[in-house]
Image (cartoon, rainbow, N blue to C red):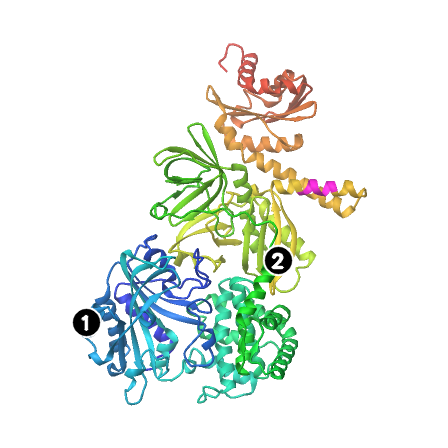
């Protein structure tokens, strides 16, 4: 029976599903909301909140296969990759978890059953390790193994920690003895491929604080991890992970491209090292890019850049002088595209980003290598063996050599690098480039009390709510419910105010701490737990944000329609005054393409498309046609889907949106630029920001003192669109008009002054009001134009005989010093006394009654 990697993976999941475990999807490589991690480095990362007692799931047993990347911090295998047969940057971790359900006896029993009964591993080749003081685990293993194959180790080997802080606990590991004569007992935990660890079972019972102390967790859990690559090597009967079906096709492709043969039996051969590095790093690069990370100069982006440049340098030793790594992507997609469909979905973008990034590096690689050779020659002349930190920094700053690449080159020459000197130069550069003005950062003091609180978010349905204070300290307050949105998914946080007992507290920011939403106010608060407050979001600012967020969704799809389906989101900012969208694309976006993109977005705005939200299980949401998922985000089992025409834009999104695209108003692109290799950025404005933009254009025209035809055409177009925007904005208030309508003998009477450009727009608004009234309704709308007033009167069809609009408007016009007339259902008038308008609007119901009496004396109005 052939144990392919696909079969091993599925067998593991099937086994734990049979034992009552929920099979959950892999989390993205970007840890959502966890500043302590650059990348997901273990299967338990997505459950960290559960282990800390800050979150819950609707299941107590889970299993999955998790994408992991270990290239920094404590769990950093980068230096070993390529030089041995079992270390990797990217790897798949098979794992099962218990959240306060089963513990040590069941966890060990499950592992033993799967390994020995399902997978038929020889019992005589298995060893177990335990934490040296864990007597319970030792005695449990006595049920399956003789004492000579149960080994005790200290914290270094058998106490597992995810990072410097966080969940941790003693662990037990299962090791596999590959020695021919089963003599490997003394090689357990010795770092040799002859006896390798295949499964780690962690008993999570502590949380490591920042000060290094341990605290007991409220509930004890089980976290296990088994590297798919290692167990495949064991089950497929090969000595090296790189000889499994996860890597062989990649290495065969490198052999084909380079014309060199992979030296399988010589672990130290330079060609073998290079091929293993390339095969390993392409996996890390492709999966990280698919999950939304782009090569760059900081953070996660710089990690990818380091990996790519390291792999590219090794490719050079195989004779490659042109970008080659991208040519491995189709092979990787063939191997792993089925369990991880994001590779297939983003294949083209992955290829193009890697090719562009490698080409950029190769342009400076040769000159950098020449400089390195010169440094080595100078050291030889002086009889020194350490590359100075300033030289390593020069290679980094001028030629793009990451420090670890310089260390790799030095290692091959028997040299070392002055890392402290390098770091000193880096710090000096950071100091020089630090801006004089520091960004305003709102600090949130996290106390144990906050971690026990929970706030209900009501901001999808309302912008103001009555709430109870749960916590108040300094300038920070937590409520039981709030309409304030917390920054997430690119959308900035709401601002507004809290009102209590006649006092108003300005809310400058909101932050999430566990399940609590912390309102950060300007100044000290005089509030106490139990008090009632009214939480009010800045309505105008939120509407601007909602317009920009819905416009961002339209923009995303418009970019794909105009530039190609390779376009993927690489980042975004949704603020009240503008929106910014980063996306994968190669080459400048041409002016005509920008015009086409802008036109398509505005077309969808004018179509007045309802913006629909659905709450669905993630499994169902994935099946929706055209659905977009941004892999930098974490999605739970239940997700929120925002739909703007199922045939156009369908995205998983937790942000706030308008209810109809017409409420966006007008969309204008204001800029386009490159931000990284293969990543472009566009900026845009909507709504009132467009009005300010038009004013700016007018000022530019006045200051320049010349008429520019194209600019005028643009200005006129925007003015027309602005007029439409004003109409749509006022029309959106019709429900409020109806709510304020007065009832007179069964007739609804609306009288409102609005802000519109001219009588034509007022007539269009009147038609919409008449349609909204439906039946038994009369409406009077008015606008001021300098020293004049314009009026429109509308009457529903069932009342036109009793209250013909033409005669009714004439009666009203006399009140403002004018005259008018028109058809029975819609009529217009003008007047020369706008100062009398407020009184006329207030008296309009009385005027209607007087009109009815004049028209039909003796009959009730």
Q: Residue at x 50, y 74 (%)?
A: 281
- At 40% from the left and 34% from the top, the residue drawn is 527
Q: Residues within 10 Å of mark 1 (few under 14, many from 20)?
A: some
Residue 854 image-quadrant placement: top right
User: Compared with residue 757, is residue 326 higher up or lower down, i.e. above or below?
Assistant: below
Q: How many callouts does the rendering have?
A: 2
For the N terminus, the image quarter is bottom left
Main secondary structure along the magenta-highlighted residues: helix
Residue 586 percent coordinates (x, y): 62, 65
Determine the residue located farthest toward the right in the rendered image: 706
Q: Is residue 136 left or right of residue 704?
A: left
| SS state under label 2 | helix
Q: Which mark is residue 435?
A: none
Q: Position of residue 11 (x, y in %)?
A: 32, 73
Q: According to the image, label 1 marks what residue?
A: 139
Q: Mark 1: which secondary structure?
A: helix
Q: Which residue is mark 2?
A: 433
Foreground residue, 354 or 504?
504
Magenta segment includes 314: no
Above or below, 679 against 327 in this view is above
Magenta-colored span: 693-699
Work out whether residue 383 or residue 417 is closer to the camera in this orientation and state it. Answer: 383
């Amino acid at each position: 029976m052939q144990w392919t990697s696909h079969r091993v993976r599925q067998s593991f999941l099937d086994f734990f599903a049979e034992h009552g475990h929920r099979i959950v999807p892999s989390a993205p490589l970007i840890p959502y909301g966890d500043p302590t991690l650059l990348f997901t480095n273990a299967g338990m990362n997505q459950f960290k909140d559960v282990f800390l007692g800050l979150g819950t799931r609707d299941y107590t047993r889970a299993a999955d296969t998790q994408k992991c990347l270990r290239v920094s911090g404590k769990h950093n295998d980068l230096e070993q990759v390529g030089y041995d047969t079992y270390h990797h940057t990217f790897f798949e971790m098979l794992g099962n978890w218990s959240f306060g359900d089963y513990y040590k006896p069941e966890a060990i029993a499950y592992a033993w059953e799967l390994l020995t009964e399902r997978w038929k591993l020889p019992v005589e080749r298995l060893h177990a390790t335990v934490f040296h003081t864990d007597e319970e685990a030792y005695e449990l293993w006595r049920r399956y193994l003789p004492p000579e194959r149960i080994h005790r180790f200290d914290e270094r080997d058998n106490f597992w920690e995810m990072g410097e802080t966080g969940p941790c606990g003693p662990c037990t590991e299962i090791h596999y003895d590959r020695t021919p004569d089963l003599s490997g007992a003394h090689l357990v935990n010795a770092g040799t491929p002859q006896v390798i660890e295949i499964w780690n079972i962690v008993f999570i019972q502590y949380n490591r604080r920042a000060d290094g102390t341990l605290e007991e967790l409220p509930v004890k859990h089980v976290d296990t991890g088994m590297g798919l690559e290692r167990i495949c090597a064991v089950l497929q009967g090969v000595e090296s992970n790189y000889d499994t079906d996860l890597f062989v096709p990649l290495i065969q492709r490198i052999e084909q491209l380079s014309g060199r043969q992979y030296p399988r039996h010589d672990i130290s051969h330079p060609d073998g090292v290079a091929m293993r590095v390339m095969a390993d790093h392409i996996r890390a690069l492709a999966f990280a890019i698919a999950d939304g990370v782009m090569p760059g100069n900081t953070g996660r982006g710089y990690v990818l850049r380091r990996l790519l440049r390291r792999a590219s340098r090794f490719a050079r030793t195989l004779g490659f002088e042109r970008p080659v790594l991208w040519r491995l992507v189709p092979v990787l997609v063939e191997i792993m595209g089925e369990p991880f469909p994001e590779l297939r979905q983003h294949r083209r973008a992955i290829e193009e980003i890697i090719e562009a990034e490698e080409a950029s590096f190769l342009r400076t690689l040769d000159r950098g290598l020449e400089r390195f050779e010169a440094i080595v020659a100078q050291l030889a002349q002086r009889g020194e063996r350490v590359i100075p930190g300033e030289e390593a920094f020069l290679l980094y700053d001028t030629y793009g050599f990451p420090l670890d690449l310089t260390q790799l080159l030095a290692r091959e020459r028997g040299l070392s690098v002055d890392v402290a000197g390098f770091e000193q130069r880096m710090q000096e550069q950071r100091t020089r480039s630090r801006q004089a003005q520091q960004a305003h950062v709102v600090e949130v003091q996290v106390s144990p009390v906050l971690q026990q609180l929970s706030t209900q978010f009501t901001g999808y349905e309302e912008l103001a709510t009555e709430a109870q204070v749960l916590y108040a300290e300094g300038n920070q307050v937590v409520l039981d419910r709030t309409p304030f949105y917390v920054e997430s998914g690119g959308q900035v946080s709401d601002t507004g105010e809290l009102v209590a007992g006649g006092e108003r507290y300005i809310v400058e920011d909101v932050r999430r701490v566990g399940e609590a939403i912390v309102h950060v106010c300007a100044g000290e608060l005089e509030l106490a737990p139990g008090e009632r407050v009214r939480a009010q979001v800045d309505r105008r600012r939120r509407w601007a944000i909602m317009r920009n967020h819905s416009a961002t969704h339209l923009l995303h799809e418009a970019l794909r329609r105009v530039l190609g389906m390779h376009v993927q989101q690489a980042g975004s900012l949704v603020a009240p005054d503008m929106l910014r969208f980063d996306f994968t694309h190669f080459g400048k976006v041409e002016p005509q393409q920008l015009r086409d993109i802008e036109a398509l977005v505005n077309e969808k705005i004018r179509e007045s498309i309802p913006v629909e939200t659905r709450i669905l299980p993630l499994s169902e949401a994935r099946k929706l046609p055209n659905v977009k998922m941004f892999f930098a985000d974490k999605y739970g089992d239940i997700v929120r889907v925002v739909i703007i025409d199922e045939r156009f834009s369908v995205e998983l999104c937790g942000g706030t949106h308008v209810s109809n695209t017409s409420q966006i108003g007008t969309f204008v692109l204001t800029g386009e630029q490159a931000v990284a290799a293969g990543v472009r950025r566009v900026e845009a404005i909507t709504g009132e920001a467009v009005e300010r933009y038009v004013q700016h254009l007018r000022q530019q025209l006045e200051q320049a003192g010349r008429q520019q035809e194209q600019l005028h055409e643009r200005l006129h177009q925007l003015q027309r669109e602005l007029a439409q925007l004003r109409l749509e904005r006022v029309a959106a208030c019709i429900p409020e008009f109806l709510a304020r309508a007065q009832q007179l003998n069964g007739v609804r009477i609306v009288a409102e002054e609005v802000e519109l450009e001219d009588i034509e727009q007022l007539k269009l608004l009147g038609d919409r009001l008449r349609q909204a009234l439906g039946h038994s309704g009369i409406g009077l709308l008015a606008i001021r134009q300098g020293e004049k007033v314009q009026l429109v009167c509308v009457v529903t069809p069932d009342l036109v005989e009793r209250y013909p609009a033409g005669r009714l408007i004439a009666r009203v016009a006399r009140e403002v010093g004018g005259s008018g007339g028109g058809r029975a259902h819609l009529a217009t008038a003008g007047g020369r006394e706008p100062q009398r308008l407020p009184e006329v609007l207030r008296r309009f119901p009385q005027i209607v009654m007087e009109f009815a009496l004049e028209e039909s004396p003796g009959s009730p109005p």
